[in-house]
Image: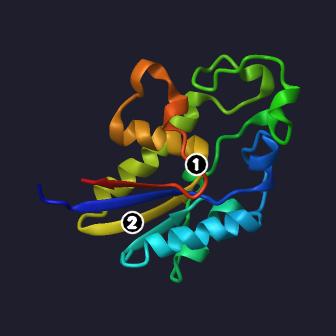
Amino acid sequence: MVVILKIYIVRHGQTDYNIEERYGGRIDVPLNEEGIKEAIEVKDKLKNIKFDLVFSSPLSRAYNTAKIIYDGDIIIDDRIIERDNGDLEGKLKSEIKDKIDFNVDKNNIYNIESITSFRDRINNFFDDITNNNKDKTILVVTHAGVGIYVRCYFEGEPLNNDYSTYKMSNGEILEYEL
C-alpha cells in the first residue's frame, strides 16, 4: 500500500469542565494543569514526526494543545470547532434530567447545533484536506464531539450505532493513512 497522506487527530488536553462533567461546546474553557501535562505527553509521542500542516479548532483548549505539540504555524479552522451545545453549555450533566441523544436532530429544545450541520462541516474539512494535500503529514487538534465524527469519516459508523465507543479521551491520538 502506498501512503499518500498521513493524518494525526488529537483531542485537546483536560479542562476543568471535563473533571466537573459539564457540557462543553463553544464555551472557551482553558486547559488545566493536567491538560497541559497531557499536551506535553502528546508532543513527546509525536516528537519524531515532521508535520507539513497543523490545524486547530479556534477554541483555546485545542489551540494551546496544538501550540504545545507544534512550534510552527498553526492554521485555525472553524469547521473543527466543537459542536454548539446551545442551552446545555456550562451546565452539569447531572442537572439535565432529559435523556439526550446527540446523534439525532430532535434536540432543538436546547438549541443544540443540528447533527446534520455538525457532521457536514467536519466532512467538508476532511474532504478538503484529503483531496488537496497529497504526500503530506497533517496534525489536527480538536474536540471529543468532532473526534467521534472524524472516526465515522475514516472508519464508518460504529457497531450498533453506539457512538460513545468512538469518543476520544483527552490527549488521545488517532492516526489515519490514505
Residue named by callout 1: 169
Above-or-below relation of 171 to 122: below
Above-or-below relation of 127 to 10: above
Q: Quadrant of the N terminus?
A: bottom left
> Type of residue at label 2?
Ile
Of badges 2 and 1, the one in the foreground is: 1
Above-or-below relation of 71 to 138: below
Q: Residue at x 31, y 61 (%)?
A: 6
Q: Nearer the viewer, residue 155 or 28?
A: 155
Q: Secondary structure at mark 2?
A: strand
Q: Within the image, what quadrant is residue 177 found in?
A: bottom left
Residue named by callout 2: 138
C-alpha gap between disc 2 and disc 1: 20 Å
Disc nearer the start of the sequence (2/1)? 2
Q: Within the image, what quadrant is residue 86 found in?
A: top right
Q: Position of residue 89 (x, y in %)?
A: 81, 39
> Type of residue at label 1?
Ser
Q: Position of residue 99 (x, y in %)?
A: 73, 17
Tell me the colour scheme of the image.
Answer: rainbow
Residue farthest left in this picture = 1
Q: Nearer the viewer, residue 138 or 77?
A: 138
| Residue 36 in the figure: left or right of residue 16 | left
Q: Secondary structure at mark 1?
A: loop
| Residue 164 in the figure: left or right of residue 50 | right
Q: Position of residue 153 (x, y in %)?
A: 39, 39
Q: Residue at x 61, y 53 (%)?
A: 170
Q: Residue at x 52, y 29 (%)?
A: 163
Q: Residue at x 66, y 16 (%)?
A: 106
